[in-house]
């Protein structure tokens, strides 16, 4: 009798623990303040709603594409939902490493009944990608190191008026577009010009005028640090990083929103999940990308919600208590002059142009 | 039966050949010895031999084209790019068949990514075409394809598809050598796209600089350590090993704080008056930064072998030299120094090989002039996903190290290396 | 300046301390004549090697002066002293061939190349290694290495050669052979040799004079035969050769002979060495080969002892007896054809003459 109880208990424990493993959901993101905002806005309410599920945070988004490919080749995908930028999502989708999502059936409708496809609109840049936020890559500058506050992106290329070092990202994307804009190319012709070898040379030549005054960054945290240390007078980075630098750390830095480049960050679901895990991942996505949840995330970080219907719901920062709307890249005041980043063009030309850019950089 | 009378094999008392008997007696011992190293053997096989084999394989493997569009490749066999004509209707029909199949598994976009490494635009060409291929009518395929994307009418794309049709390719290696295969045969890429040979060169130059500065700084320290009383030298040894105990990122960030233009060293120099405020030294985000930070990291690898060799050199050698009339410098240079060469060799090889593969530190403190070939390998692994090119670059790095090893063996002799 | 002219090396009031608290060498005064073979003998830690190192210049003297010829060499660095040296483990440079090793002292003296070659060859011939010039030290046997080391110390023709336990690493047979070779080289070349060893046989075999060191002080400085036969104190008596000890009290002193009452009450007569007054405790020292067992005639000192053990050693028989309560008393009986056969357990008479035993300072 005792023996039987013991056996039952053992089986029970074994079952419970295997069930616990099965209920672990690994969500991959960028770490830091960004993961914290997702934790508050999505993970906590989702776990409250589904007591059986335990969300495990992984901070590997920076190398998500390579890791997913490796997992896929090994046949053992351990991630359930992955946060990536739009360009990576397209790459993953092309490589067959991400699930295709049907916005009509697998995403929540807006409160007023607008379909998800319409609510996200043109931000659904890939059929595998569910956008979450709109962020922008833009410039911040040291208010104490400039005589007149810059209002134009071309201040970056104006060493006479704004002497000092600049921080730029160590890759071609965005930099070549800005260079052409400041070399007199109209906004709507930038990619046409860049499609020609002469256009690439033109962009690199423009960048060449400031090359020895540039500190090249590869991680988004570098520019805020360089600005705070006074190593650079201006530098590009993600707008949320600058928000933290200005509003939380109170550094003498201001935003130059001009010609900010919008980009998207969002979710994908990796290919190769078991049916149960896939269903749960889709359930999570449905929950985490509804109108209210996206608006909630903006309480913690200054990135704009990807749904049109979320914009009116954006409120105050959860800790600082300041209105978040004016700090959103999508705020009309900030978005007077924005640049549309062409995903399709970059998917085609990234390998080639990046090779040229790196060769240019190295010499 | 005595040994003198027989010319055959030596036998034991029982008449078994002695060799057989000995082998039998030793078999157990050998088996036990093998069992002892078996875990390591398996470990090395899994973590070292297999990955390297995989890398060699990936650097030439190119099955994706043939697997995704087999019929197209087959029908391209008769097509001659030199004809100046795009392939005929039959090839487009074959492509239609292939793409219909490929879109089911979405392998067409993967092929597009693969071919995009060779020719820009292939990615969108396949993605776009994949979306439309199901709706195509069963006639005039060529016209329909070109209507979807006019690049299908561009002979260069077809040439690339044909060129990468075979299951194995040298294309990745050509790329890694800054070369490409064009209609006119193999040639170097245009000047503004060459980067890898240049980076290989710089990697070697920087690694040698780092190795030399490790040697210059490490030699006196190792000498001191080897000649101090054990108690003192143990404390100093802990200081030497300290860099091992802090995270690489922390150390590297500390160098940033020290070396940047608004950093501690520049602040001190300005305060002392050695440089003026406008002329602050640029010591980071360039080669100087890379050399300083990596010397710090690799110093223990130089000091430890030097120390272990110096420890075994008895002080009486120098005394003997002095007793014979050699002054301090001659005694050092002709008697002490030659005996430390095995340590110098070991330390230099360690420092050099480790630095040749570094990429985190150069990425963080190297700016653009202080980055290594490994940074490009890392980029192709994690960012561009061009693993074939990364593998080819890795193979070249491996070949380079082996070649240097060979040269070292020829000049100094590999048995002249003492690691501990 | 040294007072006498015949001193080639002179230690004058030399003291040495490593830690500033204890003296390793205490007030050393020693003259070494030109062409002399002087051995510094003593147990480890007695200060002999330190003295040698001070002479070579590797250790500075804490106090006092060391003279070489007429000149104080305290401030002369080792490489300018022109002293040849043979080290304990030879210190042959492993990365050089034998010939290169030998050429080294000549090269640093900027000797012309042709002359270097002849001198090296001559030195190699001297130690009978003429064909070994192109070998590496590691390819030579211990004895050969030893010879190379000696040749290297002599090749630049120094006036003074120091040898720091040079034979310590060799086996017994080789050691004896090398002792003679070094002695012959010394005789042929006439160089001054200062030799350090802890092996008394070596010291007795080779030296003109031996300085016995203990506790940082020279206990006795004399020729080998004096050292053995006339030890100045108990330490020397016991350190050099085999020795029987009998403790007692001085009851009478007359001239150079004193009368001693040993612990069991027996009265013995012995040469007076370093005892001062009647009533002092003393240790009588006696060499085992001077003991006569069952003597035919009456001797100065006559006792009885019980034979406890007999050990047959070929040329002599070693007899361990209990004499006057000392059960470690040894007598050596020459193995002559007509010798008397003793048995263990037998009580035998024994005797020795007064001049064969020395009354020394008391040791317990």
Image (cartoon, coloured by chain):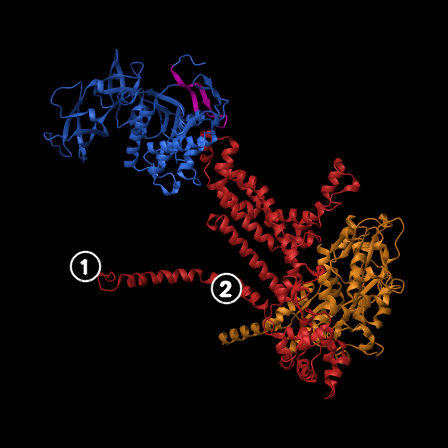
Chain colours: A orange, B red, C blue
Q: Position of residue C180 (x, y in %)?
A: 29, 30
| B408 in magenta | no
Element marked by disc 2: helix
Q: Position of residue B197 (x, y in %)?
A: 64, 57
Q: Is residue C115 above or below residue C2?
A: below
Q: Is residue A118 left or right of residue A268?
A: right
Q: Chain of mark 2?
A: B
Disc 2 packing (10 Å; few <14; some 14–19; many ≥20): few
| Image quadrant where one finds the N terminus of chain C | top left
Residue drawn at 43 percent across, 14 percent down: C2
Can you name the residue that lies furthest to the left here?
Answer: C338
According to the image, label 2 marks what residue?
B45
| Quarter of the view holding residue C217 | top left
Say which chain tag 1 marks. B
In the displayed orientation, state which residue is furthest to the bottom: B138
Q: Main secondary structure of the magenta part?
A: strand
Give B348 or C43, whichever is nearer the viewer: B348
Question: How far across and how far down the image is residue A56, in percent?
Answer: 66, 66
Kindly indicate whether the residue at mark 2 contacts the one at mark 1 (C-beta within 8 angstroms): no
- Against C199, is A113 above or below? below
Q: Quadrant of the C terminus of chain C?
A: top left
Q: For this view, does A247 lie left or right of residue C312? A: right
Q: Which residue range is magenta in the image?
A: C6-30
Residue A57 seen: no
Residue B5: mark in rendering? 1
Of residues C66 and C160, the one drawn nearer to the viewer in this rendering? C160
Give the number of the mark in front: 1 or 2. 1
**Residue reaching furthest to the front:** B83
Percent x, y of residue B420: 48, 48
């Amino acid at each position: 009798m005792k023996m039987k109880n013991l056996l039952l208990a053992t089986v029970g424990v074994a079952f419970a623990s295997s069930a616990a493993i099965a209920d672990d959901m690994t969500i991959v993101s960028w770490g830091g303040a960004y993961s914290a905002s997702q934790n508050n806005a999505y993970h906590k309410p989702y776990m409250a709603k589904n007591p059986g599920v335990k969300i495990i945070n992984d901070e590997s988004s920076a190398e998500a594409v390579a890791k997913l490919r490796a997992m896929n080749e090994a046949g053992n995908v351990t991630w359930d939902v992955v946060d990536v930028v739009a360009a990576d999502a397209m790459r993953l989708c092309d490589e067959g490493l991400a699930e295709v999502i049907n916005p009509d059936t697998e995403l929540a409708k807006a409160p007023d009944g607008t379909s998800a496809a319409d609510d996200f609109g043109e931000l659904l840049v890939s059929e595998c990608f569910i956008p979450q936020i709109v962020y922008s890559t833009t410039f911040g500058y040291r208010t104490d190191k400039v005589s007149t506050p810059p209002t134009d992106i071309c201040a970056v290329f104006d060493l006479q008026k704004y002497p000092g070092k600049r921080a730029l990202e160590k890759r071609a994307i965005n930099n070549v577009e800005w260079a052409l804009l400041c070399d007199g190319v109209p906004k709507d012709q930038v990619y046409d010009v860049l499609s020609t070898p002469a256009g690439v040379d033109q962009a690199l030549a423009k960048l060449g005028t400031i090359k020895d005054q540039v500190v090249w960054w590869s991680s988004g945290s570098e520019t805020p640090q360089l600005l705070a240390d006074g190593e650079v007078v201006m530098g590009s980075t993600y707008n949320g990083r600058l928000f933290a630098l200005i509003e939380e750390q109170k550094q003498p830095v201001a935003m130059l929103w001009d010609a900010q480049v919008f980009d998207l960050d969002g979710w994908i679901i990796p290919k190769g999940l078991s049916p149960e895990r896939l269903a749960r991942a889709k359930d999570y996505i449905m929950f985490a990308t509804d109108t209210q949840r996206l608006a909630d995330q903006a309480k913690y970080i200054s990135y704009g919600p990807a749904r049109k219907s979320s914009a009116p719901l954006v409120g105050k920062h959860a800790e600082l208590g300041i209105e978040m709307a004016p700090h959103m890249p999508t705020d009309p005041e900030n978005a007077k002059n924005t640049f549309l980043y062409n995903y399709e063009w970059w998917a085609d030309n990234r390998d080639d142009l990046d090779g040229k850019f790196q060769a240019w950089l190295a010499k | 039966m005595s040994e003198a009378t027989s010319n055959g094999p030596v036998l034991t008392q029982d008449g078994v050949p002695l060799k057989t008997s000995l082998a039998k007696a030793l078999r157990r011992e050998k088996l036990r010895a093998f069992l002892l190293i078996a875990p390591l053997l398996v470990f090395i096989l899994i973590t070292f031999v297999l990955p390297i084999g995989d890398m060699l394989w990936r650097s030439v493997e190119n099955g994706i084209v043939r697997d995704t569009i087999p019929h197209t490749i087959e029908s391209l066999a008769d097509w001659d790019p030199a004809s100046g004509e795009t392939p005929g209707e039959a090839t487009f029909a074959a492509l239609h068949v292939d793409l219909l199949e490929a879109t089911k598994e979405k392998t067409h976009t993967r092929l597009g990514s693969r071919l995009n490494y060779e020719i820009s635009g292939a990615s969108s060409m396949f993605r776009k075409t994949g979306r439309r291929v199901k709706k195509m009518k069963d006639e005039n395929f060529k016209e329909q394809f070109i209507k979807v994307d006019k690049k299908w009418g561009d002979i260069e794309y077809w040439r690339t598809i044909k060129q990468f049709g075979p299951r194995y390719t040298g294309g990745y290696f050509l790329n890694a050598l800054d070369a490409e295969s064009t209609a006119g045969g193999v040639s170097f890429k245009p000047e503004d796209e060459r980067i890898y040979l240049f980076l290989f060169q710089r990697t070697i130059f920087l690694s040698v600089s780092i190795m030399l500065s490790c040697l210059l700084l490490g030699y006196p320290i190792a000498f001191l350590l080897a000649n101090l009383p054990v108690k003192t030298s143990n404390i100093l040894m802990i200081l030497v090993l300290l860099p091992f105990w802090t995270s690489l990122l922390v150390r590297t960030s500390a160098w940033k704080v020290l070396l940047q233009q608004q950093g501690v060293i520049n602040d001190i120099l300005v305060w002392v008056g050695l440089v003026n405020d406008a002329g602050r030294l640029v010591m980071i985000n360039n080669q100087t930064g890379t050399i300083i930070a990596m010397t710090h990291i690799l110093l223990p690898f130089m000091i430890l072998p030097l120390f272990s060799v110096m420890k075994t050199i008895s002080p009486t050698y120098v005394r003997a030299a002095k007793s014979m009339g050699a002054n301090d410098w001659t005694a050092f240079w002709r008697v002490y120094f030659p005996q430390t060469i095995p340590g110098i060799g070991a330390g230099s090889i360690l420092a050099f090989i480790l630095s040749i593969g570094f990429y985190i530190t150069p990425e963080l403190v190297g700016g653009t002039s202080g980055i290594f070939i490994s940074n490009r390998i890392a980029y192709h692994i994690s960012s561009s996903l061009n693993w074939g090119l990364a593998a080819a670059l890795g193979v070249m790095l491996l070949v380079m190290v082996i070649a240097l090893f060979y040269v070292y063996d020829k000049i100094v002799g590999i048995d002249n290396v003492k690691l501990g | 300046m040294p007072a006498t002219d015949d001193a080639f090396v002179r230690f004058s009031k030399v003291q040495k301390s490593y830690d500033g608290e204890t003296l390793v060498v205490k007030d050393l005064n020693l003259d070494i004549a030109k062409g002399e073979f002087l051995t510094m003998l003593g147990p480890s830690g007695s200060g002999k090697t330190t003295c040698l190192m001070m002479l070579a210049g590797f250790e500075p003297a804490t106090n006092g002066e060391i003279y070489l010829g007429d000149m104080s060499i305290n401030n002369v660095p080792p490489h300018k002293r022109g002293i040849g040296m043979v080290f304990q483990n030879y210190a042959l440079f492993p990365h050089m061939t034998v010939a290169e090793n030998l050429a080294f002292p000549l090269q640093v003296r900027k000797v012309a190349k042709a002359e270097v070659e002849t001198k090296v060859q001559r030195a190699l011939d001297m130690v009978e290694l003429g064909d070994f010039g192109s070998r590496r030290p590691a390819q030579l046997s211990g004895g050969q290495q030893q010879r190379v080391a000696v040749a290297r110390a002599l090749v630049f023709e120094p006036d003074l050669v120091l040898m720091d336990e040079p034979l310590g690493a060799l086996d017994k047979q080789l050691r004896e052979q090398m002792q003679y070779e070094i002695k012959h080289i010394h005789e042929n070349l006439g160089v001054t040799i200062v030799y350090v060893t802890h092996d008394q046989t070596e010291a007795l075999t080779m030296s003109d004079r031996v300085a016995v060191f203990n506790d940082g002080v020279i206990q006795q400085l004399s020729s080998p035969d004096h050292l053995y036969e006339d030890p100045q104190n108990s330490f020397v008596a016991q350190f050099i050769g085999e020795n029987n000890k009998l403790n007692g009290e001085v009851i009478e002193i007359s001239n150079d002979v004193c009368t001693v009452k040993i612990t069991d009450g027996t009265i013995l007569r012995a040469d007076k060495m370093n005892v001062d007054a009647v009533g002092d405790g003393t240790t009588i020292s006696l060499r085992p080969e001077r003991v006569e067992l069952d003597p035919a005639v009456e001797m100065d000192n006559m006792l009885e002892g019980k034979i406890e053990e007999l050990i047959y050693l070929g040329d002599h028989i070693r007899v361990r007896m209990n004499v006057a309560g000392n059960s470690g008393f040894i007598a050596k009986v020459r193995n002559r054809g007509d010798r008397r056969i003793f048995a263990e357990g037998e009580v035998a008479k024994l005797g020795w003459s007064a001049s064969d035993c020395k009354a020394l300072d008391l040791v317990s």
